[in-house]
């Protein structure tokens, strides 16, 4: 089942001699439950791609469909609500709220959407991520790996269709990077979610079903292993 469709995506910054073509006619699709990694040099356009797909940055031209919904046909308010309910974001910087506990940080998107947290689902998610025993801790009492687990939990709590991860292990050492990747993939597979991840670390692409490369705003599909859907 096709979950993401990107058509003719372009993003231009600046004008005339200062013009930068960050994205050039990008086209690709993703199936539900697929995990794709995007690689490329710094400044190649991969973060711009992620931001346009996630509705954080307006493309100059092109369309993004998520589960058939034309993201940029929605007005800003509706797009914000749609993004909050259907897209989970994980960043290199954890962006946790320092005054809130682990549990409170995870359920924060639900509270923004005026939803009551499901205690059983919350407990299951924290168990999957291995942070149930840290539920009352503040971010400042956690290691980097633990903070990123909380950030993953926050991204997954709404059970979004799509997870967009921008260098999710960039602030972690190699051991924590591997642990976090394993958890991200296992959790997303468990909840049948689709992942699009940016990384500069080619070692992390071994988990991906497909690898995409962005060079000067142009996207190329490098292929990868066939995705075996979980029952």
Image: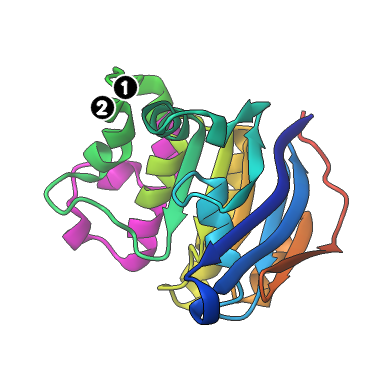
Position of residue 65 measured from the top left corner of the image (x, y, whole percent): 65, 35
In which quadrant will I find the C terminus? top right
Q: Nearer the viewer, residue 88 or 181?
A: 88
* Main secondary structure found in the magenta portion: helix
The answer to whether residue 17 is seen in the rendering is yes
Q: Position of residue 133 (x, y in %)?
A: 29, 45
Residue 200 picture quarter: bottom right
Kindly state the secondary structure of the residue where label 2 is placed.
Answer: helix
Where does the magenta region start and end? 123-149
Q: Secondary structure at mark 1?
A: loop
- Determine if the magenta segment contains residue 48: no
Q: Residue furthest left?
A: 99
Query: Which residue is under mark 1?
Result: 117
Q: Which residue is mark 2?
A: 111
Residue 39: x and y in percent read 66, 70
Q: Residue 62, position in %: x, y?
A: 66, 46
């Amino acid at each position: 089942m096709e979950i993401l469709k990107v058509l003719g995506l372009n993003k231009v910054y600046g004008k005339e001699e200062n013009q930068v073509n960050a994205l050039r006619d990008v086209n690709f699709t993703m199936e539900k439950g697929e995990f794709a990694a995007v690689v490329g040099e710094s400044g190649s356009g991969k973060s711009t791609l992620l931001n346009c797909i996630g509705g954080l940055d307006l493309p100059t031209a092109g369309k993004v469909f998520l589960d058939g919904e034309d993201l940029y046909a929605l007005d800003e308010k509706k797009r914000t609500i749609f993004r909050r309910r259907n897209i989970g974001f994980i960043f290199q910087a954890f962006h946790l709220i320092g005054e809130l506990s682990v549990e409170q940080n995870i359920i924060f998107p639900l509270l923004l959407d005026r939803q009551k947290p499901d205690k059983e689902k919350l407990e299951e998610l924290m168990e999957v991520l291995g942070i149930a025993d840290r539920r009352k801790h503040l971010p400042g009492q956690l290691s980097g790996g633990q903070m990123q687990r909380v950030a993953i939990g926050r991204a997954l709590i709404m059970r979004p269709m799509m997870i967009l991860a921008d260098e999710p292990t960039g602030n972690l050492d190699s051991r924590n990077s591997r642990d976090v990747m394993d958890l991200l993939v296992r959790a997303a597979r468990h909840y049948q979610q689709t992942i699009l991840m940016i990384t500069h670390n080619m070692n992390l692409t071994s988990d991906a079903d497909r690898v995409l490369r962005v060079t000067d705003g142009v996207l190329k599909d490098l292929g990868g292993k066939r995705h075996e859907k979980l029952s």
